[in-house]
Image (tube, coloured by chain):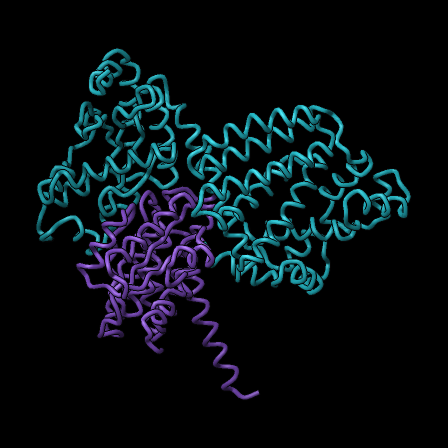
Chain colours: A purple, B cyan
Amino acid sequence: MSWGEVTIPLDESMNGQILRQAAEAVVQRDCKAVERLTAKMAERGMDVFQIMNQGLIPGMLAASQKFRKGEFFIPEVLMASRAVKMGLQVLRPLMREKSQQVVGRVIIGSVKFDLHDIGKNLVIIVLEGNGFEVTDLGVDVPPEKFIRAVEKQKAQILAMSSLLTSTMPWMKATIKLLRSSGLNQVKTLVGGAPVTPVYAKNIGADGYCREATSAPAMVRNLLGIND
Amino acid sequence: MHPDSFLAQRLGKDSKVLRNLESFSRSTGIPVRVINRGGREVWQSRPFKSKGGFCRLFAQEYKSSVCRISHQKAAQESIRWGVPTIGNCCSSILQITAPLMDSNRLAGYLLANPFMMTNPVELNSEEVASFLKNPSPADKKFYHALSAIPVVKEEEVNQAAQRLFQLANDLSHPDLSCLAKVREIQDLQGKVAEEILSVKATNPDLTPSKFFKLSFDTEKEIIQKICSGEREKAKEILNKLLAILLSQYLSDIDLLKISILELVVFISRAAVEAGAKVEDILGLKSQCIAELWRVENQEELCLWSVKVVDDIIENIYRSGTTHLDPRLKRAIEFIDQHYGSDLGVVRVAREAFLSPSRFSHLFKSEMGLPFIGYLTKVRMQKARAILKNSEESIAQVALEVGYQDQSYFTKVFKKSEGMTPKSFSKNFLNLI
């Protein structure tokens, strides 16, 4: 065994350790530690996207899992997302350096009567990190508002999330309105816990996103951009 | 009664409620206000600290309607979920809201704000900037106001929210019990969404034919639970079935109704076989079908089906005879309690007072699958639940469900679920 083979995994595991610590700090809602660890990773020259995908986002996912299991209440989730925000603030200048050009414009929002936005915010983070310009319409967005924003921003992608089965039909209504408004070139992307690929296909969505981290690849694919 | 006169009457007549509101405010440190339906403040708790007036400064900077809209949205959310809402009012400033109802109609709401969970001195420049259009670090008035905002510990916020909801309950007429059904519906929707997640995790590529097979298998599973009188388990599986049906027929409520009706017919037949009286089940059916056509949305539809299945199971219980051999019932209970230990047919047969060969024969003919197949099924069910809900290592999970050898466990799991335990838990986490 050569030295090279030993040192690379060691270095990897060091980065891996900091990533784990950062994820853990998000779960612990230790904003200061998240800020410090993110800065440390950036200093080590780690990839911005890796820091997000393997550090901050898994931390937020773990926190939301704890919420679903009843170990966390809303206050803990709010604090965990603040911790993620602290980390992102460190990364933002680096992201701007990385992607000078806007790859595409995306309009995103949670459909009408759906006020959860943890997952949607994660999608925004990873899309922005990949050079997309994202306009967040927030939560409880009626179909007309989506269409107006698409027209105004000249967006190529309309992304919608829904976390409750009862609000999913609003995605269908929005896609229908988009098509009847003659915006046929705009691609639609749907996601959210109860959304399935079959449902996405049935309502005429162009793409379905299983998890936040796969959003950039999906959007690139829809826009016909090769990696 | 006009909502405003309702509030005036409630606040005037019952000074005990006002005292309780004051004491809430003093003990939590958070100012409380009573807001009417139009967003106007009709009462506020006594200021207890040097008044910083942060909200007033903020309203000068922006429009006060920004705050009002945020409060009103939170109050509406509170009604939609039947619980108090805790959320951001503006940036890191938080609020708790609880609705005030007069005969099931919104009369106003209780608003506890502003407060923070972070010490204001720890806010970074970006957060501070979000409060002001033109931030100036020298703005003493602003920083003074910011530092006067009470800081509440994370663990106390939830408690405060529960207390505020209780106070809103006391102020409402007759009370907030009208929100109980809403909570029940949302609770069930949460469980169903969880099941959809789980179905997605185990079946990454869902085709209509796979859906069909899945619902067919799950139907068999629920019938088995109903027949063996395992009520809670039957309900759990019902949630899974609802999840499967919902993801198939979501866009068409009539199709959804028909498929759920099919399910009820199927279950009621099984109930009769399990010992329920035919006439009771028929009566139950005609009554609930009439109800079914009145159901207008899928949330109520889910609640309806849970109630119907509950009634059917209740009926089997009342009739006192489930068709399962009591010795087998005993064996099933034993398996359910001891699946984590080294469980062989000899041990379970002894528990059922049967010889191993007689037990094996009886088990297979009554349950439709051999003992070892059933045991594996139970173990896999438990393993799935552990993998979904904890971060335990695969070796630990294997041990807990009765496998000494992790690689053997992985093999069995893969055969039953179509993926390794590791990818199952990873898939599940990814889907949240």
Corner quadrant of residue B144: top left
Q: Which residue is located at x 54 percent, y 43 percent?
A: B259
One can see residue B171 in this view:
no
Corner quadrant of residue A219: bottom left
State the residue in front, B163 or B321: B321
- Give the left or right position of residue B408, taking residue A167 as reference: right
Q: Residue B30, position in %: x, y?
A: 26, 32
Q: Residue B40, position in %: x, y?
A: 16, 28
- Give the left or right position of residue B218, taking residue B21 as reference: right
Q: Residue B401, position in %: x, y?
A: 68, 52
Residue B421 vs B265, above or below: the answer is below
Residue A70 vs A13, above or below: the answer is above
Residue B187 vs B373, above or below: the answer is above
One can see residue B72 in this view:
yes
In the rendered image, the quadrant that contains the N terminus of chain B is: top left
* Residue at the far top in the pictured view: B13
Residue A147 vs B297, above or below: the answer is below
State the residue in front, B212 or A219: B212
Q: How many marks?
A: 0
Q: Which residue is located at x 46 percent, y 32 percent?
A: B184
In the rendered image, the quadrant that contains the C terminus of chain B is: bottom left
State the residue in front, A175 or B100: A175
* Residue at the far bottom in the pictured view: A2
Q: Residue B101, position in %: x, y?
A: 31, 23
- Give the left or right position of residue A20, taking residue B118 as reference: right
Q: Which residue is located at x 44 percent, y 53 percent?
A: A195
- Give the left or right position of residue B267, taking residue A41 as reference: right
Q: Which residue is located at x 31 percent, y 60 percent?
A: A124
